[in-house]
Structures are given as C-alpha cells and as structure tokens.
C-alpha cells in the first residue's frame, strides 16, 4: 500500500479479506467463497454509503454466482453519469481477476478492450496476483473500477465521447 493516498488505504483496510481459495468449479468451497464475497461487498457498500460515496450496485445474475450485473456511476461537473456493469467470474478465479465490463462505452477509449472490458492489466492485475485469494469482487471494484472511472470518465466527457443523459435527451428533441 506504499504510495497510496490515505483515503484509499483507509477504504481498503476496511474491506474484509477473503480466506477461501475456491472458484466456480469447486462445489461447496465455491459456495463458501460466495458467502465471503457477499460479506465483503456488503461491508464495502455500507462503508461507501456512510461516507456519502455510493457509486455502484451489483448482484449475481445467476444462482451459481458466476455472472454479475449492475450499475456504476461517476459524478463529473455535478452531473451523474451512469453505466451498466457486468462481469463473469473466470473458471480460474480467484487466481484470475474478473474482467469488468462497461458495454455502453465500448470503443470510446483506448483503455478498454473489445466488449467494453476495462483495461486493468498494468496496475491492477499484479496487485490482484500478489493478494490472491484474499482479494475479491469488492477489492476489484475499489482498486480496479473506481480508479478507472476517475481517470477515464472526465476525459470522455470533456472530449464529447460521452454525453449526459439530459444533454442527449435535449439534443434528440431538437
């Protein structure tokens, strides 16, 4: 955590670490891992709400807990930009981090792969590998998606690649 700002350190230390090293193919161990994932996500969400920093909603989209969907948002210039969020849990999880996808902005930035998968290779993947299996979905959101949104969304808005929903609606009416 060397070189991180105090806010990120504080947030990260309060997200519960996971202990079960299991992936989707591991039967009952995977069910235990999912319980830990939910516990960690609930703690992170509650922490964000208590700090008036609520910025995402996700839930498992299938009973196995291998497909997750939801929304994330970023406020720029006092306007809220909201995006669909989705990801699959890889079969090699937790050794492999999930690839977080924002399909609505696919192709609008170079820091994104086909299908709207955000680029996390340089900064986040080594951190994930070093902390496997203690990191989970909440950690991927905190250390992967949150900084990516903070870095990319202002640039995309300022360059006109992303329009606020009110701007898009008013230009469609014209």
Image (cartoon, rainbow, N blue to C red):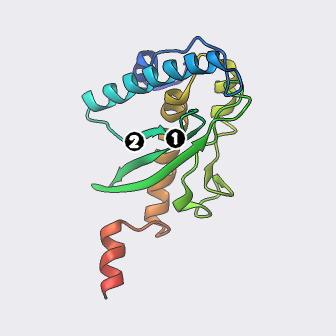
View extreme (right): residue? 92
- What x and y, as percent, mark residue 165? 35, 67
Q: Quadrant of residue 170?
A: bottom left
Q: Quadrant of the C terminus?
A: bottom left
Report if the CB atoms under discs 2 and 1 are less than 8 Å apart: yes
Residue 75 vertical position relative to residue 104 in the rendered view, above or below:
above
- What x and y, as percent, mark residue 79? 30, 57
Q: Nearer the viewer, residue 108 or 67?
A: 67
Q: Residue at x 32, y 38 (%)?
A: 54
Q: Residue at x 49, y 61 (%)?
A: 156
What kind of element bears circle 1?
helix
- What x and y, as percent, mark residue 87? 58, 43
Task: Please tell me how crowded label 1 is: few (under 14), some (14-19), or many (20+) other residues with Cα within 10 Å.
Answer: many
Q: Nearer the viewer, residue 29 or 9?
A: 29
Residue 83 vertical position relative to residue 13 in the rendered view, above or below:
below
Residue 77 shows in this picture: no
What kind of element bears circle 2?
strand
Q: Quadrant of the N terminus?
A: top right
Q: Nearer the viewer, residue 1 or 170?
A: 170
Which mark is in front, 2 or 1? 2
Residue 83 shows in this picture: yes
Q: Earlier in the sequence, mark 2 or mark 1?
A: 2
Marks 2 and 1, Cα distance to the nearest angstrom? 10 Å
Q: Quadrant of residue 163?
A: bottom left
Write down the residue under mark 1: 145
Mark sitting on residue 132: none
Write down the residue under mark 2: 56
């Amino acid at each position: 955590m060397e070189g991180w700002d105090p806010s990120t350190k504080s947030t990260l230390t309060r997200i519960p670490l996971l202990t079960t090293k299991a992936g989707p193919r591991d039967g009952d161990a995977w069910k235990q891992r999912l319980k830990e994932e939910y516990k960690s996500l609930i703690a992170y969400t509650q922490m964000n709400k208590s700090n008036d920093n609520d910025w995402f909603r996700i839930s498992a989209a299938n009973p196995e807990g291998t497909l997750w969907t939801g929304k994330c948002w970023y406020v720029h210039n006092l306007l809220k930009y909201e995006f669909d969020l989705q990801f699959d849990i890889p079969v090699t999880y937790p050794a492999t981090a999930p690839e977080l996808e924002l399909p609505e902005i696919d192709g609008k930035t170079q820091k994104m792969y086909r299908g709207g998968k955000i680029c996390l290779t340089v900064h986040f993947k080594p951190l994930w590998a070093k902390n496997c299996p203690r990191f989970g979905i909440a950690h991927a959101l905190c250390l992967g998606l949150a900084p990516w949104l903070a870095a990319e969304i202002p640039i995309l808005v300022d360059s006109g690649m992303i329009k606020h929903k009110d701007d898009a609606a008013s230009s469609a009416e014209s």
